[in-house]
Every structure is written in C-alpha cells, then in structure tokens.
Amino acid sequence: MNKKIVRIGAAFAALTLSLGSAACSDSEDSGKPTKISMMVLGDKPSNGRLEAMLKVLNARLTEQANATLEPHYIEWADWQTQYNVALLSGDTSLDLITTATDWLFAWENAQKGAFLPLSADMLKKEAPKTWAQVDAKGDWDLTKLDDGQIYFIPEDNYTQWTNHGFFYRGDWAKSAGIPDGTITKFEQFTQYFQWVKKNKPKAYPWDVAKQNEGALTGYLQGHTDWVTLQEVSTSSYYPFQIDNSGATPKVTSWYYSSDQLLPAVTQTKQWNDLGVWREDALNYDGNTREEMYAGLSGTEQHHTQTFVTQVVDTMTKKQPGSDPKMFYWGQENGNVYRDIKTHGAMAVSANSKHPEKALQVYDLIRNDKTDYDLLNFGIEGTDYVLTADGKLDHPKGWDISKDALDSNFWGGRMDEFEPTKVTDAPNKADIYKGLDAVAKVYPFSTLRVKKDQIDPTLTAIGGVFSEYIPQLQYGKVKDPAATIAEMRKKLKDAGFEDALKSIQADVDEWSKTHKAK
Amino acid sequence: MAIQLDARRVRSGESRPAGDGRDRLRRIGHSKTLIIMCLPAILFFLVFAYAPLPGSWIAFTNFNYHDGIFGSPFVGLRNFEFLAKSGQLWKLTRNTLLYNVAFIVLGNIVQIAVAIMLNEIRSKYFKKVSQAVMFLPYFISVVLVGVIAFNLLNYDTGALNALIERTGGDPIKIYSQAGLWPFIIVLFHLWQSTGYGSIVYFAAILSIDSTLFEAAAIDGASAWQRTRYVILPSLKPTFIILLLFSLGGIMRGNFGLFWNLVGNNATLYDTTDIIETSVYRMIISQNNFTTSTAVGLYQSLFGFALVMLCNWLVRRVNEDYALF
C-alpha cells in the first residue's frame, strides 16, 4: 500500500517537474487576486460556516493584499502519511504549510528541501509585523537549520500548556479517601481506581482506548528528572530522554536504561489485573472522553489545554458536582517543561509560486485583529458573540458538533488577540500560574539531530517498540522483568546504542555553543 | 470473462502464424471491441505499474526533495537494513507466506465448491439471491469488519462472550490469545472474498461445452460423477491461471483486514503480524519514503521470482496451462 502511494507520488512529482516551469503565472501583476493556499491539519467542516467566514475574510484580504486565502485540509485519518506525501508530491498549488518541530516533522522536511528558506530581508519586507514580533522575542534562532537560514515562522507568542496528565473526578477521589480529593502522587491513582472499581460498577476506573503510553510515561516522568528529547521520534514513540543533572547533558532512555521502568510496568500489571481498563483496551475504539462525560469513566488522559478549555466546562454541565481535577505528569517532582515555541509554526512551500504574497497574507492573518478574529472565531453574531465583560461566547443554540468553524489555524496565534472564553475553566488562571511557577524551559529547541545517519536504526527501533510498548502500557505481561529484558535485548540488536552514541555526539557538538541549563 | 481466462484458447490464438502487417491490422480491426474493453485496464497498469517503475530507485537513495529521486545520494542497501535489524524479518515473512497460502488454497477450494453448488441450484431466484448474499461482504469496508469483529469477540461486551456467560460458561479472552487469530483472520477473509471469487469459477462452469454434460447424462453419470469427471477437469486451467496470478502477491498482505482486526494489539503479533502491518507501524511517524519503497521492492521481487518459478514448473508439466 505504501509503495503505491510512493509510486503515485513519484509519478506526480515527475509530472509536476516537467510541467511546473511552463505553468508559471504572473497573476500578481495583473489585477486578479492571488489565491494563497494554506495547508492546515484537521477534518474539513461541511457545515458551510468556514466558507461563509472565508467570503468575508477574502473580501478583506483582496483589498489589503490583492490575495485570497484557501485552506487545504489534511484530515486526521492517516495524517502522518498524508502530510508527508502532500509535501513530497511537490504540489505547486500549496503556498503556506502548517508545521511543528515536535509533531509535524518540521526539521525533516526542512532538511529534505520542502520549505523555502526565508531571508531576513524578505520577511522584513513582506511580513514586517511578524518579523518584528518574533525578532523582539529573539526566537528566529529556533527556526534555523545548520545553514543559518530561517525555514519557518514560529507560533511563539501564544501561551498554551500541552503537558499531559490524568483528568479525574474530585468527588470520587474524596470518597476514595484521598485527602481533599486531590491526587498529588502518581501511585495514588491505584487507590482511586480501586474505589471506582468497587463502588461504581458501571464505570471503568480509566476507560482508555488503543495506544496510550500514559501509564508508563506518567510514572517515569514523575520518578526521574530526565526530559524527553522531542526532536527524535519513531513509530508513535519518543525513544530518547536527556539526563540533564550532570555537568553536560547525557542522552539516555526510559525504555532502554531506566530502573524505573520495572516498577512502572509492575504497576500497569496491577492495574490491568484490577480491571482499570477494558480487557481489550488495545482494540477498543470508543470515544473515552464522552464516556467520562457520561459518568462511565473515572479518568481521562490528555493535556492541560484540553482540560481548561473543554473538560472542566463539560464535566461541570454534564456531571454536576464531579469537581474535575487534573494531575499532570511530573507534578510530584517538578519535572515539567513549558511548551516549545515551535509546537506550531508556518512554513512557505519551496514550490510556492507566490512566496511573497503568501507572506503578506500570513502577516495579515497573524497581526490584523479583524482578519485574525474572522479566521479563528468566525463571523460575530453567527459564529460567536462577546459577552458584556468581553468574554467569547457562542450564540444561543450553537452546537459544537454541528456549528464548529474548524479553521484550524495553529501556525501563528497571538496571545493579545485571544479573548477569555466563557467555556474556559474558572480556575484557568490559577492552573497556569501553578505551572508557571514550576515549569522549566525546554533547553534543546536549537538542537539539530543528524537523523540521516540513524534513520534505518530508528525504523528498526520503532519496530521493537511497537511490538512491546503496547503490552507494557496495559500490563499485558506475565513477568514484567523478563519482558523488559527481552525488549532491551531486541533494542540492542536493532542498534539502539549506535543511535544513542550518534545523538550524544550531536548533543556534545551543540553543547559547545549552547547552554543546557 | 471465461474466454479470457481460458489459457488454452488464449494460447491457441497466439500460436497462429504471424501474418503480414495488413493481416495484423485486420485482426486488430476484428478485435476492436475487445481492445476498447481492455483499454482501461491497460491504461491502469501503464500509469500505476509501469510508469512509476523507475521511481523504485528511491529505495537505494537518501532521498531529498531538492535533488529528486535520481539525483539524491546513492546509499546501496541501507534502506533495507531495518527489516533485518528489527529481528522480525523471519517472523514477518513466515506469517505473510502462511496466511497467503491459506488464503489461496482454502479460498480457491471454497470458491470452487460454492460455484459448483450455485450451478446445481435449479431455482433461478434462489440462485440469484444466494449469489447476492454471498457477494455482499465483499463490499463491506474492512474498517467495518474490524468493528463487527470487536463487537462479536471482545471480552467485556462482546456478543460471543455474552452468549457463553448466559449459558453458564466462562468468557474467553479472545483478544489476548494469539493462537486463535489465524483461524479468525482466515474465516473473515473467506467470508469477504468467497462470493466474489466464486463468480469467476461459476462463469467458467457456464462456459463448459454443454455436449459434455449431455454425454455424461446419457452415460448415466450421477451429480457427483458429473462434478468429478466433467466440471473439475474443465476448471483446471482457470484454477491454474488464478493460482499463478495470486502467487505474485504472496508476499503482500491484506493490510486493511489485518490492521483493522488486530491493530496495535501487540499481544497477538506472534501469529498476526505481516510485513505490511509491521512496516506501517515502524515508519508511521517517519518521513521516510525510501524504506517503504524498499519493502515494496522486496515483496515484488519475491513475488516475481515465485511466479517465474511456478510458471516454469507448470510449463514443464503441461505447457498449455502456463501463462507464458
């Protein structure tokens, strides 16, 4: 199947190569507005709201820059493959591309030449406001490869916390005998789960579906002071951590080296035997968040952003008195990091025929408040309303599952344009403040791992992980110690230590010019 | 369809002495309709199988967008390494082969049996209805098949276990017993493919010369004897051609079916992991088209070698049955 995709891709690449040069248009010079296509990630809405908004927005953009914006959706089904294939195909109709260094392969694609290098002069001329804002924060370095060129624009002025954790019910935790109903240590979930299992027969203590490493990574993050290296992933896993406690940062791995993996797996086995999740959680495909909203799950696993923007509000409405709370990974030992500033970013396609126009449009949707509001919130009155105290609300009868705008602009949101939302958790500010006080800045954002050299090894490592982690995360093993040893042996055979060494060399090189603390 | 699949007739057509150009043109003129009917298939293979062939070169490169497929640095067999390094090559090759052998052998047997039974049905309406009912699963998306299987087989809420519990038994943890899955997967595969596959055999039976049946009837052949001595021998060429076709794909798995039935359930991988599913998991988050092409190439070359070998064997036994 993959091969067919590659073949199709290759065929199109060949076609566009031969046709591309002939098809250059110069509509910028003529009076017609230039169409700027922006790749976004998300499911394309079909309720007409997006089109209605674009009509208004594009009238403005035509006036401001003689251009129009057209979102191009990469839908969530098979998005990893679709995203990369779209870039590989050399599609000349794409201009702006949403990207990210930790989850959207920004460095790989920059290295492979998918993005247009952006010169300072070009940015200053075509996107002056963006240039000035990012420059003032000193964040352009976060977007450069070894060649010193800028490859994308960071969403560096938008505060969000995508640190993961467990959402649980304060009322049930209290009944479980946990002081104040507030969990402060990862292991306390055993007590919570036991109580739910015994007293809420209809509910799963933690209804969880398919891949979810939380039971392992949550434990490991709270029991080591290592930080996950976000630049290297394989299969669906991040295999490497950095031990930053010594004089120089040392590359290591929870799954390969940590003593804490055994107690973590021993605990998942205990949870599995207790019936914390469905026996067939690995194959179950239900909407577990809805289960929690329906009172059928005691726990849900996701990040702070989801908690403060959706879960608190919905739980308060659907399960009155449930007192939703969140325990985040690393809460017990303060091993928690801020979001990196390139968790969202925007690149210009190397094949774009109108890179200058694309930057002009980007500068507008990022910095012009009216354009920004239209793109992100829609049309005032039908998509959203503002309350008397300036909070963002939706008009009466608005239903998220039917009326959502879903423009999915994640490559340039700005704090100053983001209103408080009526549905935000009332204690959002406190939660942010609490995180602010302990969270550290991820120091390795400027590290560029030479992945070319370890790619085949990483693929093999991914194969081993995908065979073992699902069993370990759900405690589906007879003898945790033996299974861990078996996995580590296979990782070694796959070349894990070569990869460690190669990344360590990159880190050492980086350390000469950068500070890890 | 039956005519095209009958090896002997195709061959006898080919073995006609080659005429001069005008003769050939006239022959093409005669086959105009046939050629037009084949055109979509010919185009399909040209566009999707032959035109991209040179692109396979990507499997031997460290690909980057700038230099393109043929300009990127050559890295030899490095992109094939991971299959061996992950320590799974043997298991994956074994599983893929065994499943395909089971699919091909059982599939053809069941399809032939069904085709013969359909042929014996006298009521026209019952025949049509049976065909339609058997054909239906072919159109059900494998995603739905996966959901159906889960709702039948899962431990907590599955229909099968509910039935076992009601009748006083102990529920079975089907999704953690690797030994059961070869049967489950083969069963689902047969359920999906039998109706479709039997059509070809049914058509072949219909094209059997009716004088053979009349002669058998005069000689007093029973239904079983008719099947054994008339139908089965007449189906042999069709069977061999279909077999040779399917051998080419023996290293390719039915990715959709396996992925939707098993997915991330690593406890079942010993008996259910095939090349496609494993590779999919390995490279899902890696922007790595070179390794996936490498795998595809490995599968294609293996299938190619196998087809050549079997065709050679078939030709030695009976030249008429060989593809070429």
Image (spheres, coloured by chain):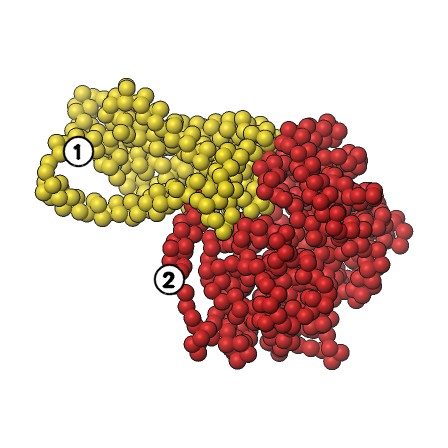
Chain colours: A red, B yellow
- The chain containing the residue under callout 1 comes to B
Q: Which mark is residue B13?
A: 1
Q: Do the residues marked 2 and 1 share a common chain? A: no
- Residue B86 percent location from the top left of the image: 59, 32
- Residue A221 percent location from the top left of the image: 78, 45
Per the model, the C-alpha gap separating discs 2 and 1 is: 47 Å
Q: Residues within 10 Å of mark 1 (few under 14, many from 20)?
A: few
User: Which residue is more in the foreground, B218 or B112?
Assistant: B112
Mark 2: which secondary structure?
A: helix
Residue depicted at 52% across the width and 66% down the height: A355
Amino acid carrying label 2: it is Ala
- Residue A257 lies in quadrant: top right
From the image, tell me which residue sits under label 2. A22
Q: Is residue B264 visible?
A: no
Amino acid carrying label 1: it is Gly
Q: Residues within 10 Å of mark 2 (few under 14, many from 20)?
A: few
Query: Against B25, is A443 above or below?
Result: below
Residue depicted at 27% across the width and 29% down the height: B324
Q: Which mark is residue B106?
A: none
